[in-house]
Image: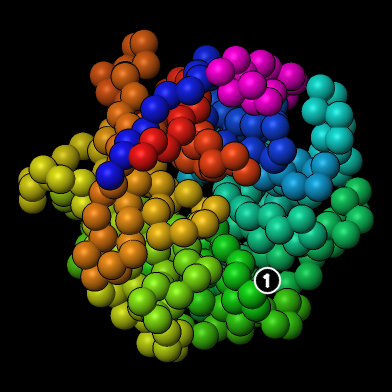
Amino acid sequence: MGGLRQVGYFDCAGGGQVVVDGTVAFVAHMRAPHGTTLVDVSDPRHPRALASLAVPEGTHSHKVRAAHGLMLVNREAQPADRPPAGVQGGLGIFDVANPRAPRELAFWRAGGAGVHRFTFDGRYAYLSPELDGYVGNIVLILDLAEPARPREVGRWWMPGQWTAGGERPAWTGRQHRCHHPIRLGDRLYVSYWHGGFVILDVADMSRPRFVAGLDWSPPFAHPTHTALPVPLPVRGRRVLLVSDEDVAKLEPAPPSFLWLVDITDETRPVPFASFQVAGVDGAAQPPFTGCHQPCEEVRGTEIPVAWFAHGLRVVDIADPHAPREVAAFVPPAPEGAERPCSNDVCVDARGLLYLIDRARGLHILERTR
């Protein structure tokens, strides 16, 4: 079964996301004035800060992606549902060929609270921005072939969001909104908060086309955070991992968990299994206890998942009908906090795992056998 062993630790302000490109870890922080920290992890036992970016009060920059010498960071008003006057949200695009001196190339401006989460494949960015005329975040694709001149390629929204076009939502407030899209092939797999998830055909990125969707909230109380396609067949089936986030519950409820959905016939997504941390009963728990975010770099059937108060759980889906935990690491509660709050996890080319806490600190781990 093996386990997880801590290799190194980087003391920093709490983070919303961590990604590693080469030997540089990019940490996106939860709260101003901390924006993004670039960290040298060439020696993971002794990580060293290379550069830091700050953000103004009333905003945060808690998401980051990096590839091919580019770094993308979000800018979002805080609180997002009541943006402070004068705050401009969007997406910052930086040249980080020299990670000691990030250089801003462009800032793509959004409306409302700005950009929440996004993914980046080195050419295209898949965003969840708020835009004028829409209720809640929608799907938007940016072409960054010329990073200094980002260009919108296409957009998609859930019918009911485009109020400027005469649509009226069938839900309350911003409950149905894009959380973030993930691309695999010519599909986008898009989590849509209390609207479940949708699968979009982006063979023509200028006209994203709805393929299928599934919404289980209600009856389940938690919003859908991530829809992650597994890029390899599992027992001959195509599997989508779906994490609900343990926040914004519709009612008091037990902690959220991880779903496995069969998308072999993508027009009929079928939930067929789930994973929950051992010992969790049906009692309601406070927010930030249960599931949050699976590692989006899927390299096999072992899936690391950031599990808020339960730290990092590695879930093996080799038998997809019976996912099982094969390793776990629960960091100590940061100073001033009552418990850990593991918010995100990524893996680098060496197989090292990076676990960021929402309150403080980055743990660098290795899998042991």
Within the magenta stretch, is there residue 33?
no
> Visible in this render: residue 95?
yes
Classed neighbour count for the residue bearing mark 1: other residues with Cα under 10 Å, few (<14), some (14–19), many (≥20): some
Identify the residue under disc 1: 155
**Residue 129 image point, x, y percent:** 63, 55
> Visible in this render: residue 355?
no
Residue shown at 47% from the left, 40% from the top: 344
Residue shown at 57% from the left, 48% from the top: 116
Q: Is residue 322 above or below residue 108?
A: below
Q: Nearer the viewer, residue 168 or 310?
A: 310
Which residues are the magenta region? 39-59
Q: From the viewer's perspective, is 113 left or right of 291?
A: right
Residue farthest toward the top in the current orientation of the protein: 335
Label 1 is placed on what type of residue? Answer: Arg
**Residue 306 image point, x, y percent:** 39, 41
**Residue 36 image point, x, y percent:** 66, 28
- At mark 1, the secondary structure is strand
Q: Quadrant of the C terminus?
A: top left
Q: From the viewer's perspective, is 130 left or right of 179?
A: right
Q: From the viewer's perspective, is 51 left or right of 240?
A: right
Q: Nearer the viewer, residue 127 or 292?
A: 292
Q: From the viewer's perspective, is 162 left or right of 304?
A: right
Residue shown at 8% from the left, 47% from the top: 281
**Residue 320 image point, x, y percent:** 29, 68
Q: Is residue 48 above or below residue 78?
A: above
